[in-house]
Amino acid sequence: MTGRGDRAVNYVILASFSLIALYPVAGIVLAAFQPPGSAAGGFSLPSELHLANFAEAWTQGHFASYLRSSLIVAVSVVFVSTLVSIMSGYAFGTMTFAGNKVLFYLFLLGLMVPLEGLVIPLYFDLRALSLTDTYWALILPQIGLSVAFGTFWMRAFFLATPRSLIEAAAIDGARRWSILWRVLVPFARPAVLTMMVLIFMWTWNEFLLALVMVSSESLRTAPLGLAFFQGQHVSDVTLLAAGAVIVALPVVVVYIFLQRHFIRGMISGSVVG
Amino acid sequence: MATVRFEGAGKRFGGVDALVDLHLDIEDGELAVLVGPSGSGKTTALRLLAGLESITSGHVWIGDKQVDALPPRDRDIAMVFQDYALYPQMTVYKNLAFGLRMRKVAPGDIDGQVLTAAKTLGLEDLLERRPRELSGGQRQRVALGRALVRQPQVFLMDEPLSNLDAKLRTQTRVEIARIQREFGITTVYVTHDQIEAMTLGRRVAVMRDGRLQQFDSPKGLYDRPANLFVASFIGSPAMNITEGSLEHAGDGLAIAFGDHRLAVGRPESRPDDGIGAYAGRKVLLGIRPEAMADASLALGTPEDRRMTVRVELREDVGSDVYAYFEGGPPVSNPGLAESPTGDDDEAGGNRRRTFVARLSPQSKAREGDAIQIAINDRALFFFDPDTGVRIG
């Protein structure tokens, strides 16, 4: 349909946008490979690949500890939120029960209210429960926030699932629990994986909550640790770049690992939405 | 195996009656078809029987068990869905085995039952495939197999052929009839296609607007339609319908419509009729296209059973010739007949003045010719102009 000229224009537009998006990222990655201590700002190719910055950042910045904290928090949040979201999405998407509309809007509220508006009262609540400065202070609120999104996401998916699939399973003798886990969840795998990636990403990158809730260094998550690290090494661009790459890498790895499913989930999600 | 009984069953969806006071007795081992246009309540009736919808009034029985309040899994039924509803992530084998596993059949027995069902339907080579790797016809057979494998009391089929192409549809129809006869499982089959209904059903329930119109054998529906709706719904091409007036003619009656006048015969030759009471009044007349013949090939038809018409269009399909000509005025209360907005091709016929006759292929009638059409007076149907009920 489209002629060669159209295609060329498309590619030029796409390429320029990619360039705009990738330029700062590439700048940081390249800077991380510069010789240690060089004040190479901007965009210049390193003469050779120096890995020393990474080793230096890793030990000086205690990134092992930060990544461990982030991993504990992110995995717990993703695991629990996914489980709960699948079940609540199933309820909202396939069953009618008293107050389901009101309850669902209540869930949506969790999507609409920004964390910045909640974080101070949340701090006092958690302090009253003596949960501040523990992993719980990071895990519990983020489960709450993720379930709001997850419920919304899974409900949309289950609403779009052919009704007859559920009915066929019911006639085949399956109870609601089996219908969900044996028929619908395997079918929903792309959507579930996409949801997991998104929740993992948001949890991993969460900064404000960690800043407010946690004071012990051993509990610091990666983005928070990176902020402290930056404070200490303002002038050492290559070292900071290496730290930033270390913090961002896990999300990139997770994304690449699941990208096939991720794209499929986004597409099915968009049809649903 | 079991009987199925609807006892005044009704369903309301938010103030709208989808099904009203349905009484239906289906015999053990019978294949009964529910047929009607969309919105006629046929699918609602099936879903009430399946337990997929709750019943608003009345009762449903399977065998000697009243199942109104039972969930689908406890009704010992199996259903074939219009879109097949195969479990997409399971292989054909697992699709067939799922119901057995859910019912805690011993794993050793599952294998045997699945293979038996697969063999019956020729699915042996497909057992490891997933639904998306199958053609439409194959998916359809898997859906049948999934119903068959459990040997339920009742089969429910919701337009199982509507997603197949015409050729496959005929094949599968024969297949369903064979399997149903072989296993003798009571079957309730829903379709909007009257040909499917007439060929498959031992008895056919014609539905309209949530109400049962008639439950009878295909021949019974064809020969003795209860009302104008059934008469116009059953048969292809659809029955020609017009308004006319019933007049005395000698010691018998005649029907006048448009430019035509046909002898009806003496009342005593139509003993089951109530048309005598309608003499001198307006009635609705129905004539099946196949009850007409080219008079030049039907010698001996008396003059008063012929009508002279001008052929507007001739369609030669080889086995038959369809001749279209000006008939009589359309029915002024079109609500009595098959809805002209229905999805049936023939539906518009009731609105037009044009009649269609199915003539022998020997007919030499050409477009523009004035010919004589001979009509068998036994094939005239009369309906009350207000209620549409058949009166003769």
Image (cartoon, helix red, strand yellow):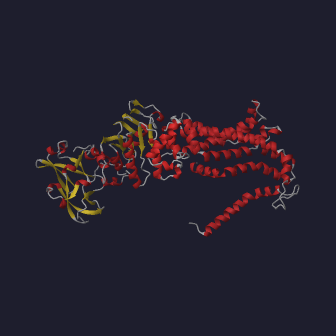
Assign the N terminus of chain A to one quadrant of the image. bottom right
Q: Is residue A180 left or right of residue A79?
A: left
Residue B124, given in percent of the width and then of the height, sits at 48, 48
B213 relative to B133, above or below: above
Write the residue at 49% across / 38% down: A172
Q: Does residue A156 appear in the picture of this structure?
A: no
**Residue lying furthest right:** A37
**Which quadrant of the structure image shows residue B81?**
top left
Q: How many marks?
A: 0
Q: Is residue B137 visible?
A: yes
Residue B102 on image: x %, y % = 52, 36
Locate residue A104 relative to residue B358 in the image: left or right.
right
Q: Position of residue B184 (x, y in %)?
A: 37, 40
* Frontmost residue, B56 versus B36: B36
- Residue at horizontal 79 percent and vertical 58 percent from the top: A27
Q: For residue B151, what is the image quadrant?
A: top left
| Quarter of image, res B39 | top left
Residue B250, image x, y percentages: 10, 49
Q: Horizontal placement of A134 versus B100: left or right?
A: right
